[in-house]
Image (cartoon, rainbow, N blue to C red):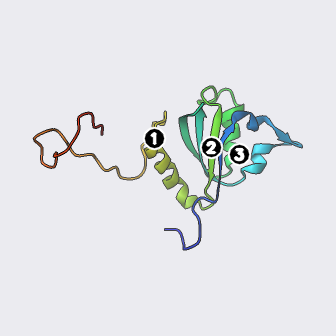
Amino acid sequence: MAKEGKRIITGYARMWPRCVCTVKDGRMLLIKKLLEQPGVYVLYWNDRPYYIGKATKKLGSRISAHANRPNTKYYNFWNFFSAFVVPDKKYIGEVESLLIAATPSENRAEPKIPRIKLPDLSPGRTGAAGASAGVTR
C-alpha cells in the first residue's frame, strides 16, 4: 500500500498523437525528455486501445521504440498513446494489470490480479432472481 500522501501515479499524458515521437528538442527526441520516468502506457488505434505495456526504465524510450522501429510487433497498429508515470517500480505491474483487466485490447497477457467470476445467472439457479438475458462473463 502506498504511504499516506504518496501517489502511485504521479502524472499522465492522455491521447498524445504518435507524431510526438519524432519531434526533436535539439538533438534529443522530445518524448524522451518529457517522459523520463518508468510507468505504464496504452497504444491506441484512433480511440480504441490496442496494446497496454510497461516501461521499467523510461516511458519515452519505450514508446519511442514502438514508434520508430518498423520491425517491432506493434509498429503499424497505433496512432495515439497515453502514458502514466509510476515512479515506484513495485507498482508498475499492478497498474498494468488493472488497465489490461479494465480495457479491451489485443493484449495476450493475463492480468496478475485475481479475477472474480460472474456466477451462473441462468433461470432456475440460486441467486438468479432478477437476472436478465444477455449477461456476459
Tag 3's secondary structure? helix
CA gap between label 2 and label 3 equals 11 Å
Amino acid beneath label 1: Ala
User: Going from the N terminus, do you reach mark 2 or mark 3 first?
Assistant: 3
Q: Which residue is pictured at 23% across the width and 38% down the height?
A: 132
CA gap between label 2 and label 1 equals 19 Å
Q: Which residue is mark 1?
A: 109
CA gap between label 3 and label 1 equals 22 Å
CB within 8 Å, label 3 to label 1: no
Q: Residue 68 in the image: x percent, y percent? A: 72, 32
Tag 2's secondary structure? strand
Amino acid beneath label 3: Gly
Quadrant of image for the C terminus? top left
User: Pointer 1: residues within 10 angstroms few (<14), some, or many (20+)?
Assistant: few
Which numbered circle lies on residue 82? 2
Q: Which residue is pictured at 59% across the width and 37% down the height?
A: 43
Q: Which residue is mark 3?
A: 60
User: Pointer 3: residues within 10 angstroms few (<14), some, or many (20+)?
Assistant: many
Tell which residue pokes out farthest to the left in this image.
124
Tag 1's secondary structure? loop
CB within 8 Å, label 2 to label 1: no
User: Going from the N terminus, do you reach mark 2 or mark 1 first?
Assistant: 2
Q: Quadrant of residue 11?
A: bottom right
Judging depth in this view, the residue of 25 and 123 nearest the camera is: 123
